[in-house]
Every structure is written in C-alpha cells, then in structure tokens.
Amino acid sequence: MRKLIGTILLIAGCFTVTLAQGPQDQKEKGKRGEKLLKEMTTTLSLTTDQQNKIKPIIEETGKTMKTNREKYKGNQKCMRQSAFQTRKASEEKIMAILTPDQQKKFTEEKNKKQEERKKKRQEKLMEPIDCK
C-alpha cells in the first residue's frame, strides 16, 4: 500500500512539476497545463468528459503552486511542503476521475518519469567538475 501511495504521489509530482516551474516567457503562459492535459490524454486515452474534469484541476494546481511560491519565497522547506501537499491533493482528484486501467497506467508513467529523473541526476553528478 505504501509503495502504491508513493508511486501515485510521484506521478502527480511529475505532472505538477511542469506547472510548478512556471512559464519561461509570456508566450508559454498557460500552455504548460494544456501540454500536460494533452500528454495525459494521449498516454491514458482520456475521454472528453475526463478531460473536461481534469483541466480545472490542473489549472487550480498551477494557480496554487504560483501562490505558494510567492507566499513562501525564500523558505525552501515550506515551499517544498506546500508543493507536496498541492500535488498530493491534485493527484487524488485526478485518480478519482480515472478508470482502474488508467490509474495503473498513470502509476506506471509516474514511475517511469521518476526513474528518468533519477538517472539524469546521477549522470549530472558523474560529470567532471573543476573544484579549484
């Protein structure tokens, strides 16, 4: 059960990290949520009804993340905790909308992305550095 919950949280994290990073320029504003929904639609074969239910959740998550970044600016611990809680709540809402098969796929994708990030982090740490 703990593994399942951890996996679910990780996938939600993967999906909401995109929202948490914020747009790089004004043209990208609002497109991260659209990109995330499109990716979820393709990966999970979401129905139109599911898309219509998930879209406001993604938008709400993005707004909450932005508010929390501003609120806790300079306090990394609080920022991380609020981001975690926001992602967890978002993921629970999304999981309630998905079918059991989609939930399984969602969890698998979350694990896959976590492993990819872990591998990239390890590769980055293995790069030679100049510590003079």
Image (cartoon, helix red, strand yellow):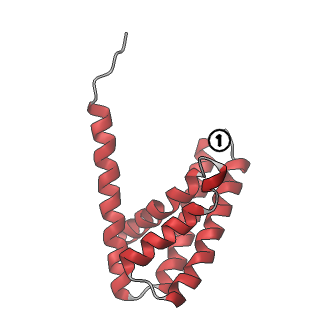
Does residue 3 appear in the picture of this structure?
A: no
Q: Position of residue 108 (x, y in %)?
A: 31, 70
Q: Which residue is mark 1?
A: 75
Q: Is residue 58 left or right of residue 106?
A: right
Query: Which residue is located at x 31 percent, y 33 percent?
Result: 125
- Which quadrant is home to the N terminus? bottom left
Asked which quadrant contains residue 102, the reply is bottom left
- Packing grade of label 1 (10 A; few <14, some 14-19, many >=20) is few
Q: Position of residue 30 (x, y in %)?
A: 63, 62
Query: Which residue is located at x 72 percent, y 48 percent?
Result: 70
In terms of depth relative to the viewer, which is nearer, 51 or 126?
A: 51
Asked which quadrant contains residue 4, the reply is bottom left
Q: Position of residue 14 (x, y in %)?
A: 44, 60
Query: Which residue is located at x 44 percent, y 84 percent?
Result: 46
Q: Is residue 5 left or right of residue 27?
A: left
Does residue 128 appear in the picture of this structure?
A: yes
Q: Position of residue 34 (x, y in %)?
A: 55, 68
Q: Secondary structure at mark 1?
A: loop
Asked which quadrant contains residue 103, the reply is bottom left
Badge count = 1
Outermost residue, top side: 132
| Residue type at tag 1 | Asn
Placement of 52 over or under 70, stated as above or below: below
- Which quadrant is home to the C terminus? top left
Placement of 120 over or under 95, stated as above or below: above
In terms of depth relative to the viewer, which is nearer, 4 or 96?
A: 96
